[in-house]
Amino acid sequence: MNWTPSLVEERLTEAAFVLKRLPEPRRQGYFSVWPEITHSFADKVGQAPRPMNIVPSPAAISRMEETLSWTVGLDPVDGKIVWLRAFGERWKIICWTVGLQRSAAHEHWLYALCVIAFKLNGRRLNRNLSKRNVIALASAVQR
């Protein structure tokens, strides 16, 4: 498979979505001895419907686990931007969090996606290249 920055972005977004849907870990040894409460129809009439908790499939969890290691070699700021963006955070919040302007944060994000795509394709990246050159190189390869 030929990885592109857009495919990497989709996979990171899927991993973030799976992470949101995973059930909360339970502490062992704690339990309730109270019986389960069953509500009658009259009790449920005025209540708001509870959202359904859909557990992700094992294949989605496996893809998510693979994706978690992709940001290991990145600069910490770049990794933070990538994961905040994957979780759907707005650029304004991302800029406040990492202390960069919008254009700089966007360039760091694109650079990180390109670096991940190069690594996944098995290509070595010259560290002497600037962020803009890496982004231009990735867009040329994508065509």
Image: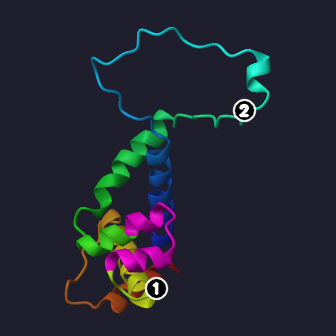
Residue 2: horizontal and vertical position, in percent? 44, 65
Please tell me whether residue 49 is drawn above or below residue 3 in the rendered image. above
Q: In the figure, residue 114 lies in which quadrant?
A: bottom left
Taking the spot 47% from the left edge, 57% from the top edge, the residue there is 11
Please tell me whether residue 33 is drawn above or below residue 78 in the rendered image. above
- Depth order, front residue of 109/92: 92
Q: Earlier in the sequence, mark 1 or mark 2?
A: 2
Q: Does the rendering let one see residue 2?
A: no
Q: Is residue 131 left or right of residue 14?
A: left
Asked whether the beta carbons under mark 1 and mark 2 sit within 8 Å of each other, the answer is: no
Near mark 1 (Cα within 10 A), the count class, few <14, some 14-19 or many ≥20, is: few
Near mark 2 (Cα within 10 A), the count class, few <14, some 14-19 or many ≥20, is: few
User: Gap in Å between the C-alphas at discs 1 and 2?
Assistant: 55 Å
Q: Is residue 49 left or right of residue 32?
A: right
Query: Considering the numbered disc 1 on the image, is that residue within a helix, a strand or a loop?
Result: helix
Q: Circle 1 sits on which residue?
A: 140
> Is the N terminus in the top left, top right, bottom left or bottom right quadrant?
bottom left
Q: Does the rendering let one see residue 99?
A: yes
- Depth order, front residue of 89/58: 89
Taking the spot 45% from the left edge, 52% from the top edge, the residue there is 15
Three-letter amino acid code at the position of disc 2:
Gln
Q: Circle 2 sits on which residue?
A: 47
Q: Is residue 17 inside the magenta stretch?
A: no
Q: Is residue 24 left or right of residue 54?
A: left
Residues rendered magenta in the picture: 82-98
Residue 137: horizontal and vertical position, in percent? 39, 86
Taking the spot 40% from the left edge, 89% from the top edge, the residue there is 101
Taking the spot 45% from the left edge, 34% from the top edge, the residue there is 23
Secondary structure mostly seen in the magenta stretch: helix
